[in-house]
């Protein structure tokens, strides 16, 4: 963990990611904000997610936080799309997702920007 970042900072980041995935899933369900409940869930989930991300950025470098945020978020949203909406992932999509996961792991396990 980096620059004084604690486990709680990464817990906040993880929670922010889960809320962003919830917001994105609700965004799909909102049908272009024509359905009230999913639309409200989208706005609230994104607002809380960004707030938690802002707290994370007090101790986690922005590039590292965003690499984790985007990488994990892409994989989770793709998984939700597959499981909940039946959206198929072909081999190139799966390979690309694997490369994203590999990239996040390399940044977190090997980068000097993140203290080990």
Image: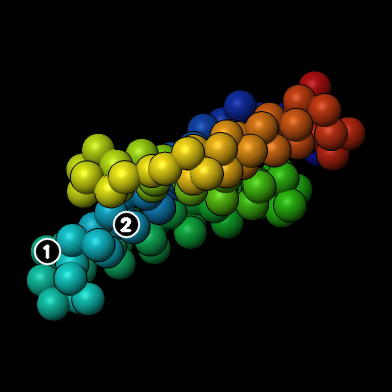
The reply to whether the C-beta atoms of the residues labelled 1 and 2 are less than 8 Å apart is: no
Q: Identify which residue is drawn at 13% across, 77% down.
A: 34
| Picture residue at 56% right of the left edge, 50% below the top | 70
Toward the viewer: 62 or 8? 62
Which residue position holds label 1?
37
Tell me the quadrant of the picture where the N terminus can be found.
Answer: top right
> Eyeballing the image, is 28 above or below 9?
below
Q: Residue 61, position in %: x, y? A: 75, 48
Residue 24: quarter of image: bottom left
| Distance Cα–Cα, label 1 vs label 2 | 12 Å
- Above/below status of 45 relative to 11: below
Name the residue furthest top. 116
| Image position, residue 69 (x, y; %) | 56, 47
**Residue 108, located in which quarter of the rendered image?**
top right
State left or right for residue 56 relative to residue 21. Answer: right
Tell me: residue 97, above or below residue 29. Answer: above
Q: Is residue 40 left or right of residue 23?
A: left
Residue for badge 2:
23
Instruction: Work out which residue is located at the far right of the displayed protein and give it.
Output: 112
| Residue extending furthest toward the front | 91
Is 93 placed left or right of 42 in the picture? right
Residue 11: mark: none
The image quadrant of residue 105 is: top right
Q: Name the residue rendered at 39%, 63% in the picture.
A: 47
| 10 Å crowding of disc 2: few (<14), some (14-19), many (20+) | many
**SS type, badge 2:** helix
* Image point (28%, 48%), residue name: 87
Give SS at disc 1: helix
Front-lying residue, 1 or 96: 96
Q: Where is residue 45 in the image (x, y as percent from the top left)?
A: 32, 56
Q: Where is residue 64 in the image (x, y as percent from the top left)?
A: 72, 45
Taking the image as shown, residue 57 lies to the left or right of residue 87, namely right
């Amino acid at each position: 963990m980096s620059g004084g970042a604690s486990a709680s900072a990464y817990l906040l980041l993880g929670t922010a990611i889960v809320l962003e995935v919830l917001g994105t899933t609700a965004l799909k369900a909102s049908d272009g904000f024509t359905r009230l409940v999913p639309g409200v869930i989208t706005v609230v989930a994104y607002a809380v997610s960004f707030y938690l991300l802002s707290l994370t950025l007090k101790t986690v470098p922005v590039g590292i936080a965003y690499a984790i945020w985007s990488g994990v978020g892409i994989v989770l949203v793709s998984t939700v799309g597959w499981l909940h909406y039946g959206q198929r992932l072909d081999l190139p999509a799966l390979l690309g997702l694997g490369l994203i996961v590999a990239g996040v792991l390399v940044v977190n396990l090997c980068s000097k920007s993140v203290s080990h």
